[in-house]
Structure formats: structure tokens, C-alpha cells
Image (cartoon, rainbow, N blue to C red):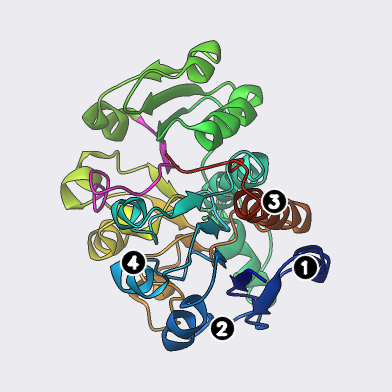
Amino acid sequence: MKKIVITRRINPAMVDKLKKDFEVVVWDEDNTPMPRQRFLEETKDAHGVMTMLSDKVDEEMLNGAQNLKVVANLAVGYDNIDLEAAKSHGVIITNTPDVLTETTAELAFTLILTSARRVLEANRELMAGEWSGWSPYHMAGTDVFGKTVGIFGMGSIGAAFARRLSGFRTKIIYHNRSRSEAADELGAELVSFEELMAESDFVLCAAPLTEETRHRFDKAAFDKMKRSAFFINIGRGAHVVEEDLAQAVRNGDIKGAALDVFENEPISDAHPFTDIPNMTLLPHIGSASVDTRNNMMNLCVNNIMEVLNGGKPITPVR
Ligand code: DGY
């Protein structure tokens, strides 16, 4: 019987579906990743693996996994996977595009409004019993309505976010490797990185992490932004030089930031971001709705079954 390893607790119905035809080993933990050593051990004789973004699929793992045919990553991003190494070992990599687009765009939208309207600051004040009453400028924030929003990475999530902005009468500009038809339809304008940073009142990073985009948001980039602007990141933490962002927000070089992702996750309350009031920080929940997570799991299961039964993967990473 072919063996499948799943590196985190998933919906039991999906495990049962696989168990009909395969031996399945599940790391039955919700919050802790399968330890690296165990991952290397279990995958040695595995034919398929369902990985999370916290699992590294690299030369070391692939070298040891001689039977491996498919790795189904439970994420649209796949920066945890060495694609070159996978290719040279003949291992198919799949991800979960499309099924999480709308949910992740909703979270991006939550972040833009939350940071602009100081929702968390206001909530913290009230919960701490520090609300002394109404006053004209109390917790006064920034309007999103009528502003310029810049999107870095106009893939399907960037476009779904842009569609949500249409009721806010914003000007949308974007920076992307190529022109996006979806963005064109929304009247968005393709601009250089420098223009994006300089003209936007809100910059959203929705790009996949590549060597080209790693640490793209550094001091030089934040220096280009308006002092009244906000930076929002739902892509990957490593797009950002975190020290530079902390300094930009602390010094008032930009107005605030809202982040769902960090370079080294999870962060603790000792992270320099956590004592900056105008930062909205979330624990990487971009695609975390129950329906979407179930759809992502289902897609991973179907990708693994297709490949191990001799068919073609549904959503291969090319
Ligand atoms: C992804 O799919 O890449 C997300 O970051 C996971 O929530």
C-alpha cells in the first residue's frame, strides 16, 4: 500500500477518504508542526506528503524520500519548497490557488479598514477602561474613501482585493511583473515600484515571495512613502526588512502598518512590532475561514490521489 504523510491535523473526513486506498500517517497536532526529524523519518518511505507552509521541502528531505511522487502544499504560496530540487528528484508539487482567493482578499480588506480607522487601538483603550468620553478628534483615523491604493502583486488575490475597493471610489495603482487584464478592467494603472510607493495612501503587498521580492520593502522603499500612508502585508513576512518597517512607523515616516505575515513565524510578544500602537498584527490568518480551509484540504487530497493513481495533478506548481 502506498503511504501518505500529513504533517498537521486536518479534517478527519479527508483522512478517511485517503485511508480507503492508502496507508496514512497524520501528525495529529493542531498548533505544533511535525518535528523536522520525524518529518524526515516518516517521509523516507512515503509516496505522497501533504505539507504546511512551516515544513521545509528541501534537498535533504527529497534525498531521503526515494518513493516520493507528490507534495501537496496546503497554501497558495510555496516558498517553503525548493522547486529546483523537487524537479530534479521528479517530485510533483501542488498548491491551493483560487480556493482561497476571496477569503484572503477579505482579510486584506479587514486590515486596510482596521488600520485606517484605528480599530484595534480604540478597542484596546475601551477594554482597558481608559475611554473617558467622546471628543472631536478622539481616535480620529484616515478615510479609505477617495484615496489612492497601491497593490504590489496583481495576481488573483490582488485583483479580488481591488474589486472590493470599487465601492470606495479609490484610485487603484499596481506594480506587477506584467500587465493584468483583471486590473485593467477595474481601471487600475500599472506603475513603477517607485511610483507605487510614492503615490499610494495605502500600499498592499499581495505578492508571492521570490528571490526578486525578498526584502523589497526596506528603508529606501519606506522613505519613498507619504508620511500619512499605511503599509499592509498579506504576502510573506520576508518581503519586508522588519527592522526598517518598525523604525519607519516608530519615527512617523509612515502612519501605520497592518501585517498578517512575519519573517519568522510565530512571533512572540517580545517582537519589536508588538509595542508599536499603530501596528495591526494578525497571526497569519489570511485564508483562515473554515470553508476555505476545508476546500484547501480537499484540493490537496485530490491532488495526491490523482498523482498516486497515475493521473495528472489538478493544480501543479509550474
Ligand atoms: C497561503 O496560502 O500562502 C497562505 O499564506 C496560507 O494561509
Q: Is residue 52 left or right of residue 193?
A: right
Spatial distance from mark 3 to mark 4, Cα to Cα? 23 Å
Vertical order, 110 against 149 (above or below): below
Vertical order, 69 against 193 (above or below): below
Q: Which residue is mark 4?
A: 58
Q: Which residue is mark 1?
A: 11
Q: Is residue 91 magenta?
A: no
Residue name at image x 61 percent, y 57 percent: 119
Q: Residues within 10 Å of mark 3 (few under 14, many from 20)?
A: some
Q: Which amino acid, mark 2?
A: Thr
Q: Which amino acid, mark 4?
A: Asp
Spatial distance from mark 3 to mark 2, Cα to Cα? 25 Å
Q: Is residue 65 left or right of residue 175?
A: right
**Marks 4 and 2: in contact by CB < 8 Å?**
no
**Residue 32: numbered disc:** 2
| Image spot of residue 260 (x, y percent) | 50, 59
Q: Which amino acid, mark 3?
A: Asn
Label 4 vs 1, first from the N-terminus: 1
**Marks 3 and 1: in contact by CB < 8 Å?**
no
Q: Which residues are magenta?
A: 200-217
Spatial distance from mark 1 to mark 2, Cα to Cα? 16 Å
Q: Is residue 206 magenta?
A: yes
Mark nearest the camera among 1 and 2 is 1
Spatial distance from mark 1 to mark 3, Cα to Cα? 14 Å
Label 2 vs 4, first from the N-terminus: 2
Our reading of the magenta stretch's main secondary structure is loop
Label 3 vs 2, first from the N-terminus: 2
Residue name at image x 43 percent, y 53 percent: 78
Secondary structure under the numbered disc 1 in the rendered image: loop
* Residue 74 location, quadrant: bottom right
